[in-house]
Image (cartoon, rainbow, N blue to C red):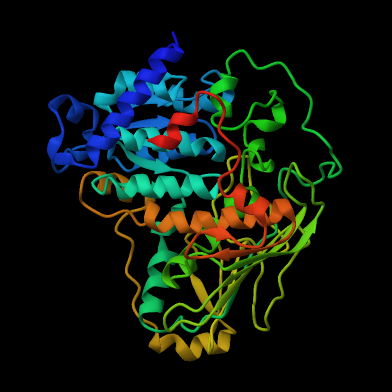
Amino acid sequence: MKPTQKSRRSFLKKAAMLSAASAVPTIWTKAADQWATGNKSLKAGEKVNLACIGIGNQGGSDVFSHAKTGLANFVAFCDVDMGAPQTQKVLEAFPNVPRFQDFRTMLEKMGNQIEAVTIGVPDHSHFAITMLALSMGKHVYVEKPMARTFNEVELMMAAARKRPHLATQMGNQGHSEANYFQFKAWTEAGIIKDVTRITAHMNSGRRWHGWDTHITQFPPAEPVPGTLDWDIWQSVTKDHNYNHDFVNGQWRCWYDFGMGALGDWGAHLIDTAHQFLDLGLPNEVSMLKAEGHNSFFYPQSSTILFKFPKRGNMPACDITWYDGVNNLPPIPEGYGVMGLDPNIPAPSSGTLKAPKLNPGKIIYGKDLTFKGGSHGSTLSIIPEEKAKEMASRLPEVPVSPSNHYANFLKAVKGEEKTRSPFEIAGPLSQVFCLGVLAQKLDTTLKFDRKTHQITNNKMANEMLVGLPPRKGWEEYYKL
C-alpha cells in the first residue's frame, strides 16, 4: 500500500529534520543515527548495504557492476515499473531482495538498513531522489548527468557540501579508468598544457533522429501500462500524459525529461579535460548549428561553442561540441584511424554501430595535439611522428586501483575518495545544462561565472531554475 499524502509529508519533514541534524553531527540523537547510517564506519572487509533505485536498462547495468566488485550487499530494489521486461534480469539474479515501486516508501521502511543508494533513473528524476537520500544520511551514486537544471545541480552540490562524511559519485564510469590517470599525469608533467581549444564529437545516430521536427505538441496520450506508476515516473516535472516515446530511454530525446546527446555523452568525453584544465563554467555558450530545431526534442545535429576564460596561468579555452550523424568536426592532419573504439561500452539499447568518426575529442595545445576516444580511452599524441619523438619523455601512468563502482563503495567504507564527487561532477553537469539551454533557445548566452546569472537573456536566466515543480514535489527543493 502506498503512503498517504499526509504520511509522505510527515516523511519529508522527518527527512528535513535529519538534514538539519546532519549539518551538526555532535547533536545527533540515537534515533537519528539509525536513519543516517552514512556516519557509520564500516569494518575492513564488510560489504556496503546498498539500495538500487532504477533497475532496468542503465540502472540494471549499475546493479550488476556493483555486484561484480564483491563489496555490495543489496538490501532493496526500487523501480517505478517492476513488471517491465527490462527489470527482470536483475530480479531473477537477486530474487530475495525486497522490492519497492516508490523510492519514498523504500527509504521510509528500509532506511535503517540502507547505507548507500544507486540512482539509475531518467535525468529528470535524479534530483528528488538524490536530495532525499542525502538528507537521510545515505551515500549516493547517481547516473550522469547529475540533474536536468542548473539550479538542481547547484542544490545537490550544496547538499553534499553540508554532509562531507557522505560519499557522492556521478556515474561517468571512465572517470576511474586509464584516461583519468593518464590525463592527470600528463597535465602534472606539463605534457598537456596551454590548451586553447578542444573539439568533442558524438556522431552516432540518436533515438530522435528522423522524427518530425515540425511538431507543435507532445505525442498523444496512450493508456498507462498496468505495472507502471506514471505519477512517480514524472517526478518534479509538470504533468504529461503517458506516451511510449517518453519511457525506456526515449526520455532522453525530450527537453522536459533528458539532456540529449550532450548530457548523455559529454560526461564521457570532456570530463577529464574539464577537471584537470580547471575549466569551471563558461562565460559564453553559442549555438553554431541547430539542424531540425524545435521546442520539444533535440536537434538532428548540434554544434555548440563553449568559451572558458583564462584561469590562472592557463589560457582561455574553447570547447566545440558536435553531434549529428553528418556533423563532423574538422580533422587535423595526421589524425589517423577513425574507426569505432572497442573500449567504448555498448549502450543499453543495443550495439553501437560504427560511425563515420569514433566518438571522442581532439585537444589542441600550444605545442602538441592529442586525440582521444570516449569513456576510459587514453589519449594519443598526433601525428604519429610526434608521438614517437615524445615517447621517452612521457611520464609513467599509474594503474587504476579500483573501477568507478568499487571506488564508490570503497569511499563509503572510508578506504578511498570518489573520483567524480559532486564538487567535480557538478560544474561539469552545469556546463551541459547551459549547453542545453542554448540548444532549446537556439541562441547565444552570456554567463556571469561569479553571480551564476545569464546576463543577456531574461528568459534563459529564469530557465536556470526552470518551471515550478509539480504539486507535492516542492519539498525536495527545501531539503
- Residue 312 in view: yes
Left or right of residue 209, residue 142 in this image: left
Which image quadrant is residue 52 in? top left
Which image quadrant is residue 246 in? top right
Which image quadrant is residue 478 in? top left
Task: Please give the name of the residue rendered at 54% of the width and 83% of the height, measured from the top-left corner.
Answer: 365
Task: Please give the name of the residue rendered at 57% of the width and 84% of the height, measured from the top-left corner.
Answer: 384
Q: How many marks?
A: 0
Task: Please give the name of the residue rendered at 57% of the width and 50% of the height, measured from the top-left corner.
Answer: 464
Closer-to-camera residue (20/343): 20
Left or right of residue 452, residue 289 in this image: right
Question: Relative to 436, does residue 75 appear above or below in the rendering?
Answer: above
Q: Position of residue 370 (x, y in %)?
A: 55, 78
Q: Quadrant of the N terminus?
A: top left
Question: Relative to 214, does residue 435 appear above or below in the rendering?
Answer: below
Task: Please give the name of the residue rendered at 58% of the width and 23% of the height, measured from the top-left corner.
Answer: 85
Q: Quadrant of the C terminus?
A: top left
Left or right of residue 29, residue 274 in this image: right
Q: Position of residue 212 (x, y in %)?
A: 85, 41
Left or right of residue 162, residue 298 in this image: right
Q: Position of residue 74 (x, y in %)?
A: 32, 29
Closer-to-camera residue (117/149): 149
Residue furthest toward the top? 1
- Residue 54 in view: no
Q: Position of residue 62 (x, y in %)?
A: 44, 39
Question: Relative to 6, does residue 25 appear above or below in the rendering?
Answer: below
